[in-house]
Amino acid sequence: MMDVSPAERTLPALLERQAAAFGERPYLSVGETRRTYAEMRDAVARTAGSFAAAGVVRGDRVAIMCENRRELLDSWFACAWLGASLVPLNTATRGPQLEHVLGNSGPRVLAIDPELFQHLEVVDSLPPELERVWLLDGSGAPWRGLAVEPFPGPGDSLPAERVTPDETVSILYTSGTTGPSKGVMCPQAQFYWWARGTAAMLGGLGEDDVLYTCLPLFHTNALNACIQALIHGARIVVGPRFSASAFWTRMAESDATVTYLLGAMVSILAKRPPSPADSAHRVRVALAPATQAELHELFRERFGVTIRDGFGMTETNAVIGARDGKQRPGTMGFVMPGYEAKIVDELDEEVPDGTPGELVLRADEPFSFATGYWRLPEKTVESWRNLWFHTGDRAVRDPDGSFRFLDRMKDAIRRRGENISAWEVEQVLVSHPDIAAAAVVPVPSELGEDEVMAFVVTRDGAAQEPEELIRHCEPRLAYFAVPRYLEFLDELPLTENGKVRKFVLRERGVTDAAWDREAAGYVLKR
């Protein structure tokens, strides 16, 4: 495992060091692109040159919205090279949420897949900082006074800026809980510590490993995998979206030894009929947070793959997981070296083992956690109060030192690896002219994690068809945030001061009165 000085805990320093050490060894495979370590360094230096020629300077933000492709990785490393920050946007972001993310991040440049450009058309206002739009394929006519140009080709090779471990290299938008999505400021060093910690959870990585991820590069998990490969001299293969039918074939074709899943994906793969492809691969271990306990042994016996569970957040790191090869299936795991975790009450006092409370975390090393929320200092102070990061997760610590997740204290929903803001879904629902009030809660999914359920009240008893309300949501929400279940109520349960008593709705859950989008055969547009 690479151990470097604090000053070298930056993406440019790591890339230059490994390019010098490994040169012609294969590093990256994504789409049709194949690069060695040296070729990756050279491509990043030239991409940084083209960015600089377009006016991108230290401290700027560059936003990008696309599927897994080499331009996203080139942009990320190039921003790191220049001291700028990449803002990778979830491709499912729509309507008010997209407008908020762009307005909050304030990018100088927006690079976008032409197929996603239509989603900009419904954005009412653009950030004043935005100067140009780059299309990842082709070019277009000027739009709203902005130049629409092709994504730039390689420019003059530039030496890396002398960036420091504390500088923000990514702003990643995670779910809002009681308000709009927040931009997590991820410093350069955070990804170094992500890579080290995740590799430890996996049982170690080496130069012969091939890491395969089909998770989206706009989330920290896949970005982290790229740095895991980098610091261990391994190869990273970035694949297309997860496909259960093609998954094991892709593992064999890529010669993967390590992969990354989410608990829902594990469940989906386990439910597929047996196939010769199940064992015709080299994968030995998969990091798969939130995997159901009973699937660990099934996965090992059927696929020959050890599941490693773990817990981390965009704001934190690989904090809890399989430590020293020790894991309790169905739990989050044990605190990893370099971190602290405890369970506290509402006054931040630690509670005894076996007592539920909020999980709070902190790190020993500087800049191994995010440094806060972009342009939201009050939210930063709230979450990092008393020098501990407050996860908003209700958990319990068992006497053996392992942690068990119970539920979410925050008003957030997690569906198949995606964080969903209940507040944002509610805002879209009540924007419908016939809806007077709405409350959105998580309900259990048969695949693990949550499904989205909305309780709605119509205006003056107006009749409302569920399908029509879903059609209203589709262009305004990410597909994964569109409610699966709808139930129409005469009124929402309220507290004395008018707040919705959501615990009542969570306890009510899915009843016979609820409409189920999937059971009704309604197919979402993506």
Image (tube, helix red, strand yellow):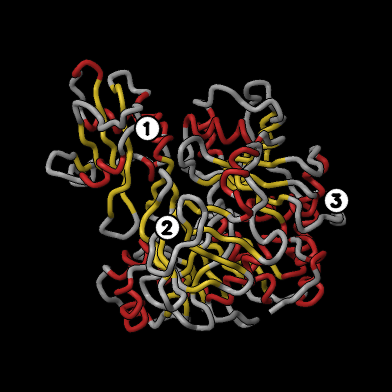
Q: Quick one: label 2 or label 3, which is nearer the N terminus?
A: 3
Q: Quick one: label 1 or label 3, which is nearer the N terminus?
A: 3
Q: Image check: 164 left or right of 130? A: right
- Name which residue lies at 73% across and 44% down: 152
Q: CA distance from mark 1 to mark 3?
A: 48 Å
Depicted 130 relative to depicted 230: above or below: above
Disc 1 to disc 3: CB gap under 8 Å = no
- Which three-letter amino acid code belongs to the residue tagged 3? Asp
Q: Quadrant of residue 500?
A: top left
- Where the C terminus falls, by quadrant? top left
Q: 10 Å neighbourhood of mark 1: few (<14), some, or many (≥20)?
A: some
- Which three-letter amino acid code belongs to the residue tagged 2? Gly
Q: Image check: 339 left or right of 270? A: right
Q: Tag 3, which secondary structure?
A: loop
Which mark is on residue 426?
A: 1
Q: Is residue 246 visible?
A: no
Q: Quadrant of residue 45?
A: bottom right
Residue marked by disc 2? 357
The one of 203 and 30 positioned closer to us in this rendering: 203
Residue marked by disc 3? 156
- Where the N terminus falls, by quadrant? bottom right
